[in-house]
Amino acid sequence: MKRILSCVLAVSMAGGLMACSGSESKVKNYTVSYDGIATGDVSSGVSVHDPSILEADGTYYIYGSHMTCAKSDDLLNWKKVADGYNKTNPVYGQIYEVADKAFAYSGNKDSIIKTDDGKTHVWAPDVIYNEAMGKYVMYYCTTSTFNASNLCFGTSDSPEGPFEWQGALIYSGFTNKNIDATDVLDYVDEDYAKKHYIKAGAYNYEDYPNAIDPTVFYDKDGRMWMTYGSWSGGIYLLELDPETGLVIHPEADEANRVDAYFGKKLIGGGHISIEGPYIMYDQTTDYYYLFVSYGGLTSNGGYQMRVFRSKTVDGDYVDMKDAFPEKSAMHQDFGLKLSGNYKLPSLEKAYMATGHNSAFIDKDGREYVVYHTRFNDGGEGHSPRVHQILMNEEGWPCELPYQTQGETVSESGYEKEQVVGRYYVINQGTDISSDIANPFIVYLNKDGSCDGKDITGTWEMKDGSYYMKIKLLDKEYSGVFCQMKDEAGTDCMTFSAVGENETIMAVKYLND
């Protein structure tokens, strides 16, 4: 029989979490020891920033900023395919053969809008197999300043390229002086463009997007869409023509935030931190999930993954509380925070700045989130990560705490003896900061109670499934149990649960 249970912490998880030191972490005035727990290597073998994933004939490819690409057959170990701004780059290098076209507007020192640092910038690619074209199509951006960018696309017969530049799609960052270098006036008249897109002679970046971070997907009806945007005016959506790969510009509908050139505004605006949009449709829940990243992308910038959902492809996208107010000054309160900075047993370093993700569903129906992480090692090196996500009973994604190593959740659930015991628990909170979520101990007891240092309460699990619920500090979380391996390959039981836009993760070692 299902029981309604709760778990109340007497200590503050927000104020009590402290940075980790060596092999220990502290919560309030007591220490959580990792003695006897092996640590794993956090290196994936490659460095791919802003990884966007593609599966092709059983091989997984991730494409990233700075013209990088890697591949894997297990989502854990990666081999470099391409890296760096050079003409010999086998995946992207062809762009330099048409540099006068590809970089005419933005992206290098010779562009109409020149790069701030005089270097070449090709960022945030996303590759999709276009069934109508019979081609692999890469969507990416060339960018010059914080709001002057150009969405472009290229095609290839192979996921490993070379991708041949096909043309430009969307422009941003233009001014009165260079708007004629764009195609904007093909879709809106000059008076409208200057009234809306230009502010005091410069680009109105607080209301309109930075043409960067494009990702492409099919909806449940087979229509093709591109979502894009970074900071500036927020996240936008445009339909694509599958026969050509080109943008289908909509009719303007100001009441529904649809612009004839840039498309439908989904969320954001006011130059708040929001970028890296990615939309995944889940047939089981019948929701579209919009993933974005908040914060600054450096190790201490508070970079993190958030998710919203909608029953329709063009929104409204909402979080666990409500819709996201446009230009919200308190945007940390909105969007389910999947992952930020955290430390768990077996991690030799804390994960920092986990973000700019893609997501996918494999042939067996398992769902994954793919992102890059930095570490609390004083540097800015980054590494790709793939974690399985499981939908909770209410259809919200719960990210499992460790890299996937082929784990399969038990659809029929777990015996109580398998899940009771001592857990290392972290609360991701909703803040945007450099703080690291470190573990505290919670015991899930057989009688339904839970306790620990200054902790008392209760928990529940749903018979015949992997679903669980727990209540912490008067906040209710709904989640999942899953047995998996930690970073060192040690078997453990985990749970991940979400509530009020927060994520908690927990791990229990089977020999405890």
Image (cartoon, grey):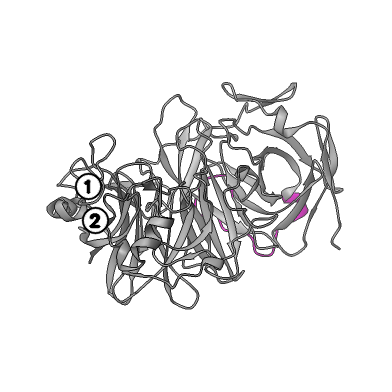
Residue 254: say if magenta. no
Judge whether residue 323 can be spotted in this image.
yes
Q: Which residues are magenta?
A: 400-418
Q: Amino acid at mark 1?
A: Ile
Badge 1 element = loop
Residue behind mark 1: 112
Q: Which mark is residue 390?
A: none
Mark 1 and mark 2 lie on one chain; the one further toward the N terminus is 1
Above or below residue 12? Residue 191 is: below
Give how far apart the Cα atoms at labels 1 and 2 are.
Answer: 8 Å
Secondary structure mostly seen in magenta is loop
The answer to whether marks 1 and 2 mark residues whose Cβ atoms lie closer than 8 Å is yes
Q: Is residue 74 left or right of residue 326?
A: left
Q: Is residue 446 left or right of residue 311?
A: right
Q: Amino acid at mark 2?
A: Ala
Above or below residue 336? Residue 127 is: below
Residue behind mark 2: 181
Q: Is residue 401 left or right of residue 453?
A: left
